[in-house]
Amino acid sequence: MCRMLIAVGTVNVSWLIDDFITMARDKNERHENNENKDFPHGDGWGISYIENEKLKVYKSPKPCYEDSEIHSFKQKDSPLFILHARRGSVGEVKWENVHPFNYSNYVFCHNGTIDEELKYEKKFIPRGETDSERLFYYLLSGQKNGLTEKSIFDKYIKINDFMGMNTIVTDGNISYIINWYEKKPKYYTYKILKEKDFVIISSEILPHFKNSSWQKTKNHDIVKLNTLTKEYEKYSFS
């Protein structure tokens, strides 16, 4: 189970990171998992961004709210940022199990738990033990022409034993943000903020932008987000 966000365009990165930390510390929204107890996401964190036209990934097994290194990214200039805070349900707390995962030109992160054993091509060799990394390889298997909203749907609809399969996957130009869960809609529903200069899609409404007009995704929505144009389309498969 995790908290994550993606932002494209010109956005205040310092606000983005501060709000991400607040979200990971469980000091933001109320949902099904923190109704009666604190529910922080402290089992590692990661960030992906574009530098010299390539996707870069940094990740750490430390909680983001205890890792001073996260503040160094406030100075980054990138048209795309992905941030992920992990609360592990499968696999121990170590670097290999922290998101985002990357393979070839794709970067991937996941929120949820999958109990089903997923099959993927032999060329993919997991570094860690997580269901998330295996979902990534399952998603990429057989995709000779790259991911599309339809190819993603065709893969997801075949999985039966899961709690949540919320996903952000990107090649830097096109990102797919998948909202797919079995229960706990407050926890799993994405929030979308579109402004003139940027788009943010997040697990929660971010404090610095709380007075803006956020929209919610629906279960089985797949959002296609273009980094260059900052436009997005929602595909509903419910």
Image (spheres, grey):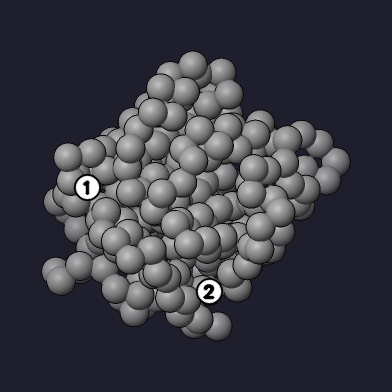
Depth order, front residue of 109/17 = 17
Residue 238, relative to residue 177: is it above or below?
A: below
Percent across and percent down for residue 227 are 32, 59
Is residue 220 found left or right of 28 in the rendered image? left
Tell me the residue at 50%/81% (across/down). Answer: 236
Depth order, front residue of 144/83 = 83
Q: Secondary structure at mark 2?
A: loop
Percent across and percent down for residue 199 are 47, 58
Residue 150, relative to residue 30: is it above or below?
A: below
Q: Residue type at mark 2: give it.
A: His
Is residue 200 found left or right of 47 in the rendered image? right
Is residue 162 found left or right of 134 in the rendered image? right
Tell me the residue at 44%/51% (across/down). Answer: 7
Badge 1 crowding class, 10 Å Cα cut-off, few under 14, some 14 to 19, many 20 or more, is few
Inter-mark Cα distance, 1 to 2: 25 Å
Q: Residue type at mark 1: give it.
A: Tyr
Badge 2 crowding class, 10 Å Cα cut-off, few under 14, some 14 to 19, many 20 or more, is some
Q: Quadrant of the N terminus?
A: top right
Tell me the residue at 48%/62% (across/down). Answer: 196
Q: Earlier in the sequence, mark 1 or mark 2?
A: 1
Is residue 84 at least partly visible in the picture? Answer: no
Is residue 203 at least partly visible in the picture? Answer: yes
What residue does disc 2 label? Answer: 220
Q: Secondary structure at mark 1?
A: strand
Tell me the residue at 22%/47% (across/down). Answer: 103
Percent across and percent down for residue 232 are 42, 70
Q: Quadrant of the C terminus?
A: bottom right
What residue does disc 1 label? Answer: 103
Residue 63, relative to residue 236: is it above or below?
A: above
CB atoms at circles 1 and 2 under 8 Å apart? no
